[in-house]
Image (cartoon, rainbow, N blue to C red):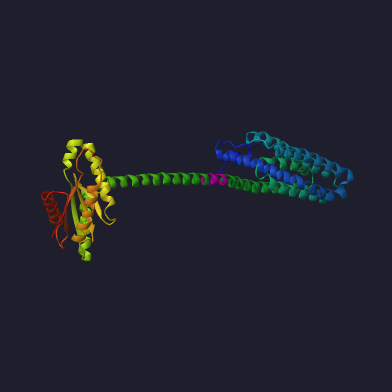
Amino acid sequence: MVSASNSDHISPRPRTVGPASALVWADQVRSLYQHVLGNLLLAPLSWILLAALMWPAAGAQTVWFSLALLAGAALAQLAVTLAFYFRRPPVARYLAWCRAQFVMIALAGAAWGLVGMVLYHALPDLTYHAILLLFIGAMAAVVLVAYAVMPLAYFLFVIPMCAPVLVLLLGEDDAVSRMLALALIAYVVVMTIYMWQACVSIRRSFRLRYENQALLDHLIAAREETEQANNELRHANEELSEALGRIRQLAAHDDLTGLPNRRYLMTALENERARCERAGESFSVCIIDIDHFKRVNDTHGHISGDSVLQAFAACGLRNVRDADVFGRFGGEEFLLILPGTPREAATQLVERLRVKVARHDFGVTSVSERLTISAGVAEYRPGEPLSELLGRTDQALYRAKREGRDRVIAVD
């Protein structure tokens, strides 16, 4: 709710310096000019009505003088009003234009007051005086609509318009004239009260409009900030998800070969064991060791050894099935999990891998013989602990090494 002091309504410029007050005052000036222009366009109708009412009693010369006086004041006010619309002054110049319009409004009110005084003297009896007062009262009601936006404009028009006739009426000796003067005063007071209330409502509507617009702008800005924050949060979440994915990748895979590491392999083994227990199936496990790998490191260095491990990892991935899990178990040992594969089929698959490795050139040219692998294969027994399964597989691997390496040994 917006409240305003009396000085805010009467002054041609608001004494508050807030942005909303300045905008409301600028709207009041524009609205004042708009209503003045509307009144000026309708003014000839009031002149015609006045002439029709007063012509029989006041005479042609008096009526024509009155019309010329009103038209002159109206033309001067129209010139100022049209200049405002054509020049479109900036808000910073509104104060000067407001004062100019106030002068024109006071001039128009004085013209009406002079016309009222002239007609009062020319009219023959009290009946026409009463008609003149009714016309002046009607004019006060009409301008109330236009000038309610700025009460000072209303006072500048109504006081010069009514004062001469009131003085003449109060100067009469008869009681009827004085009663008419008092009635006109009461009427103007009532109109002033309504005008004041209208002004408060108009100012409140202007102010609420700007406050609502400011609130809307604030909400739009808040929404944009929220959207920006959401986008930043979404981007941060995406970066976090990528980082977590990389962390999971690093935690589950070997840095050198990119294969699943021992932790991942043990989890995969446990999952496969649980699946086979539920489905009543079996799977096989193979431990693979690169033969004489220490010789590669000792002869060619660890960088060459790392290259051999990477090349063997790539070779192994190309020669296992999509469902198989192939990873680095530790050092030069690798583990192969073959889901749903019995021992014989697993042995054949690993044998094919052994042949591929034996024929593969790992780039260690100074070694006289090709690199080979030894492998041990074991099939899971229902209810068997993983430690026993890996122990049997490891025994098969050691047997393959004892029997001369470069071979695959399967155990029951």
Question: Which one is in front, 151 or 315?
Answer: 315
Residue 271: in sight, yes or no?
no
Question: Which one is in front, 219 or 34?
Answer: 219
Task: Residue 86 in the image: state x and y as whole percent.
Answer: 72, 38
249 displayed left or right of 147: left
Name the quadrant of the C terminus. bottom left
29 displayed left or right of 41: left
Residue at image position (27%, 57%) is 323
Question: Which one is in front, 131 or 376?
Answer: 376
- Looking at the rendering, the stretch of residues picked out in magenta corresponds to 208-215
Query: Mainly helix, strand or loop, the magenta region?
Result: helix
Numbered disc total = 0
Task: Residue 85 in the image: state x and y as whole percent.
Answer: 70, 40
Residue 206: in sight, yes or no?
yes
Task: Residue 185 in the image: state x and y as whole percent.
Answer: 71, 46
64 displayed left or right of 351: right
Task: Residue 100 in the image: state x and y as whole percent.
Answer: 70, 35
Residue found at the very far bottom of the displayed protein: 280
Whether 260 is among the magenta residues is no
Question: Which one is in front, 69 or 75?
Answer: 75
Q: Residue 393, relative to residue 244: is it above or below? A: below
Residue found at the very far front of the displayed protein: 368
